[in-house]
Image: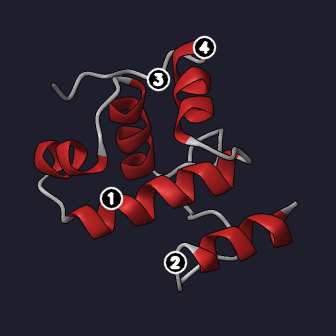
Amino acid sequence: MRDITARRLRRLGVRDIPRRPSRTAGPDGLSAREQEVLALLADGLRNAEIAGVLFLSRRTVEHHVAAVLRKLGMDNRSEAARYARRNGVATALR
């Protein structure tokens, strides 16, 4: 599964694909920033809007979204948004 996801990410232009979760990863393997991105993604925000809320570049948000999808083993944003809503990912940033 990881090889397929890594190939997809490379096709999307992601160059730095981490081999293991960060040390500060939560129970689902997401870093704190990735959890924030997931919460905003679940609210239906686009990358540019997430970038504005978190004061990041759109490119950085693209990397975070790709990492979230990879770590959760999901193919698209809507699957990740459903996962976030089912698991009560908080959206206290807005």
* Amino acid residing under circle 4: Arg
> What residue is disc 2 on?
14
Q: Secondary structure at mark 2?
A: loop
Q: Secondary structure at mark 1?
A: helix
How crowded pointer 4 is (Cα within 10 Å; few <14, some 14-19, many 20+) is rated as few
How crowded pointer 1 is (Cα within 10 Å; few <14, some 14-19, many 20+) is rated as many
How crowded pointer 3 is (Cα within 10 Å; few <14, some 14-19, many 20+) is rated as some
Pick the quarter of the image with the C terminus. top left
> What residue is disc 4 on?
86
> What residue is disc 3 on?
89
> What residue is disc 1 on?
61
Query: 14 and 91: which one is in front?
Result: 14
Residues at marks 2 and 3, CA–CA distance in whole angstroms: 25 Å
In the rendered image, which quarter is residue 28 located in? top right
Q: Nearer the viewer, mark 1 or mark 3?
A: 1
Residues at marks 1 and 3, CA–CA distance in whole angstroms: 18 Å
* Amino acid residing under circle 3: Val
